[in-house]
Image (cartoon, rainbow, N blue to C red):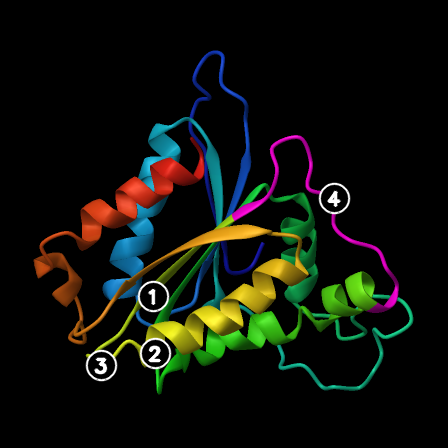
Amino acid sequence: MPGVQVKKTGLQKGRLSVKILAFHGSPRIGGNTDELLKETVRAVGEAGHETQVFKLNSMDIKPCQNCGGCDETGVCVVQDDMDEVYDAIRGADRIILASPIFFFALSAQTKKMIDRCQAFWCEKYLLKRTIPEGSSGRKGLLILVGGMKKDIGIKCGETTAKAFFRTVSVSQHETIGFLGVDAKGAILDHPTALRDAYEAGGKLVS
């Protein structure tokens, strides 16, 4: 599958398997978002669960055309790599959204994917069909990092992410955000960031 990385680990005996979906929203491989997400996924893997990672920058996802094609069906009429994303979102028990903060907002790669979830919005609010929560429930984790020092970027990014999470039946999510981190790899020098990301991943599947 284009743009999709799958990581599998052995399930620990006696533990319920949950499906973990992660969106890598940064165009920079080896950057701060990347390092944080790696730690989160590592914790999930060590807990014995599978994580499916979509690297959005390398995927063929067109912006929402606001064409109304999904109004009556809840199905997007644009066919591209979002078809895989739709299926993955429906089947996920936990969703991780990781993005840098650009101009006090989520990255374009992340926002483009979210905008295409208008199909889910129509399905839920117009057609009154919601994605079932399943036996494990549905929870989310938002990871944000940016160079600014004011928290408005965190607040703005979380507002958009919350709208996305609630649209896809993720009723609760945790947010971890890091400010004043700009240069590539600078997150590695942060005193708690990697540990925070690892712990958040473990908590997500606990």
Q: Point out residue 4 in the picture as x, y percentages from the top left corner.
A: 51, 54
Whether 22 is among the magenta residues is: no
Q: Give the side of residue 146 with respect to residue 189, left or right.
A: right
Q: Mark 2 highlights which residue?
A: 153
Q: Earlier in the sequence, mark 3 or mark 2?
A: 3
Tag 1 and tag 2, C-beta contact below 8 Å: yes
Tag 3 and tag 2, C-beta contact below 8 Å: yes
Q: Which amino acid does label 2 sit on?
A: Gly
Vertical arrangement, residue 115 with respect to residue 20, above or below: below
Q: Point out residue 159 in the picture as x, y percentages from the top left corner.
A: 49, 72
Residue drawn at x 28%, y 49% is 197
Vertical arrangement, residue 192 with respect to residue 204, above or below: below
Residue 41 visible (yes or no): yes
- For marks 4 and 1, give the CA distance: 27 Å
Q: Mark 4 highlights which residue?
A: 132
Q: Mark 3 highlights which residue?
A: 148
Q: Which amino acid does label 4 sit on?
A: Pro
Tell me where residue 190 sits by quadrant.
Answer: bottom left
Q: Mark 1 highlights which residue?
A: 144
**Which residues fall within the magenta stretch?**
126-139
- For marks 3 and 2, give the CA distance: 8 Å
Q: Which of marks 4 and 2 is nearer the N terminus?
A: 4
Q: Which amino acid does label 1 sit on?
A: Leu
SS for dot 1: strand
Taking depth in this image into account, of 160 and 51 the one nearest to the observer is 160
Residue drawn at x 81%, y 63% is 123
Q: How many marks?
A: 4
